[in-house]
Amino acid sequence: MDSQEKVIYHGHHMRIEYPEIRKHRFTKDFSWGFYCTEIQKQAEKWASKFNTSIINVYKLKDIEHLNVKQFEDYTDEWLEFVVNCRSGKTHEYDVVIGPMADDTIYDYIEAYIEGQMNKQKFFELMKFKYPTHQISFHTIKALDHLDFFKSYTI
């Protein structure tokens, strides 16, 4: 594998050689897109909610040529970005990388949005969460930087 390539995973109920970006009823952390992770176990957890659990493995290459937004950790900027995206707002990035808001974290975000929790309390609770990672692709141009490598059933 080239030094510019990275292996990423997508958990699903089927093999996905040609990823797509679909608009769904609910927006996700970084808006509508095709979501993957660098953490194999996390992808396996995503896939485990299906009767048939398949992990798709991709090589990601040359994303430095794309408009990429990267969050290193849970920050004020990350929180505002996720709140905006989950509220239906879109952005101009090809790729967004950062930690994810799982169901528990999403409950914290809802409490923050509704004024039941301030930022300080939100980040205090976040310190105790396990590490997560997501990389979301939001344009066809971004998907062109993914090469399907293989899939396997768990």
Image (tube, rainbow, N blue to C red):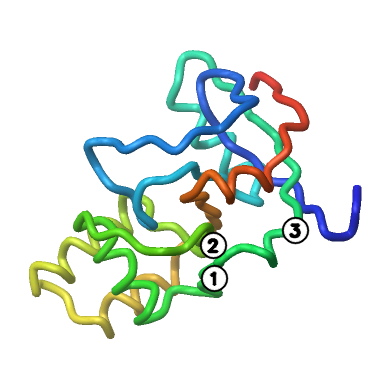
Which of 129/88 is in front? Answer: 88
Nearest to the eye among marks 1 and 3: give it: 3
Q: Quadrant of the C terminus?
A: top right
| Residue bearing the label numbered 2 | 97
Amino acid beneath label 2: Ile
Vertical comparison of 122 with 16: above or below: below
Kindly report the distance in space between the C-alpha atoms of the residues bearing marks 1 and 3: 15 Å
Q: Earlier in the sequence, mark 1 or mark 3?
A: 3
Point out residue 147 in the picture as x, y percentages from the top left corner: 73, 38
Secondary element at image label 3: loop
Q: Residue furthest bottom?
A: 120
Residue at x-position 72% and y-position 32%: 148
Is the Cβ of the residue at disc 1 closer than 8 Å to that at disc 3? no
Q: Is residue 52 left or right of residue 41?
A: left
Q: Is residue 148 left or right of residue 66?
A: right
Secondary element at image label 1: strand
| Residue bearing the label numbered 1 | 70
Determine which of the numbered discs, if any, sits on residue 113 in the image: none
Vertical comparison of 59 with 48: above or below: below
Amino acid beneath label 1: Gln
Point out residue 127 in the picture as x, y percentages from the top left corner: 44, 74
Kindly report the distance in space between the C-alpha atoms of the residues bearing marks 2 and 1: 5 Å
Amino acid beneath label 3: Asp
Kindly report the distance in space between the C-alpha atoms of the residues bearing marks 2 and 3: 15 Å
Q: Earlier in the sequence, mark 2 or mark 3?
A: 3
Point out residue 115 in the picture as x, y percentages from the top left corner: 9, 74
Disc 1 packing (10 Å; few <14; some 14–19; many ≥20):
few
Q: Earlier in the sequence, mark 2 or mark 1?
A: 1
| Residue bearing the label numbered 3 | 62
Which of 77/18 is in front? Answer: 18
Is the Cβ of the residue at disc 2 closer than 8 Å to that at disc 3? no
Is the Cβ of the residue at disc 2 closer than 8 Å to that at disc 1? yes
